[in-house]
Amino acid sequence: MIESIKKSYLSAGETFTLASRCKEIITPEISTQLGLVEPVKTLDFAMGTLNTSMGNSSKSSFTEQLKDLDRLCDRSVMLLSNMAEAFTYSHVEEEAAAGKKILAIIRKHIPVLSDLGYVNQMARMKTLYSELISDTNKSALETLRLTAYVEQMSICRNNFEATYISKNQSEAETAPIIKTKEATAQTIAALEAMFSLINAHLLLTGGETIEKLVANLNQIIDSIHKAAK
């Protein structure tokens, strides 16, 4: 007979490991022969729910895209800052004054780029853009011929924001609606239902195949129990 699962011993992760290892040794041939096709499907579904509830679902497809867009935003700010700073050394007094003015505004809003965090940085870039294009500073940008670079910075920020919003909406739509504790219980219930059917076959028909399967399942259960202690 298959050993009983000591539910109180097992964490969600250990339950998932137990289910995975048990399912691995139930081949399609054995599943068909013993009438386990539906119980295995039920176990598969329960394991999927448990995996998602533990936060182990696949990484958001937006992750790398956001990293790339963040790098573009960083570069756009750095380029604007470096160009404004370069103009502070201009021999043309008007350009030097405009460079100092624009550089001071940039440093006021974004003193450093590192460790700002996505939300904070994008908010700062938005207020920076608003101040740079204001009537007060428009002439300084035109003097330095930086208007196009300011607009490019805004485009980078807007692209990032749109992607970030899409990411949050996507994650909200696919967020697990079941708690890990409940998903763990469902997985154990699916395992126990499958084990009950296997035990019934062992008692009614027996045979080398099912006896070997029961022995292997007990070995797995025993090893998980020992690891969990």
Image: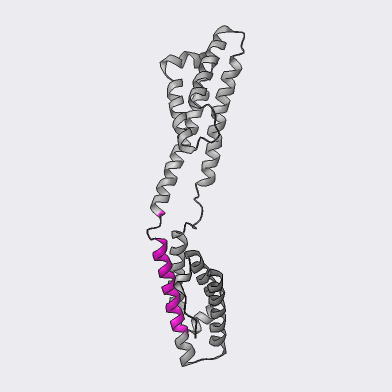
Nearer to me, 16 or 95: 16
**Residue 195 appears left or right of 64:** left
Kindly tell me whether residue 61 is visible in this rendering. yes
x%, y% of residue 211? 55, 87
Q: Which residue shows up at 50% across the image and 49% down it? A: 61
Q: Which residue shows up at 57% across the image and 89% down it? A: 208
**Residue 223 appears left or right of 178:** right
Q: Which residue shows up at 46% across the image and 25% down it? A: 128
**175 in magenta:** yes
What colour scheme governs how the chains and residues are painted in the rendered image of this protein? one colour
x%, y% of residue 195? 46, 80
x%, y% of residue 37? 46, 77
Nearer to me, 126 or 116: 116
Q: Residue furthest left?
A: 177
**Residue 172 appears left or right of 70:** left
**135 in magenta:** no
The stretch in magenta equals 174-198
Q: Quadrant of residue 89?
A: top right
Q: Which residue shows up at 44% across the image and 32% down it? A: 123
Compared to 118, does 229 lie above or below? below
Compared to 112, does 41 lie above or below? below
Q: How many marks?
A: 0
x%, y% of residue 85? 58, 19
Magenta span: predominant SS is helix
Kindly tell me whether residue 25 is visible in this rendering. no
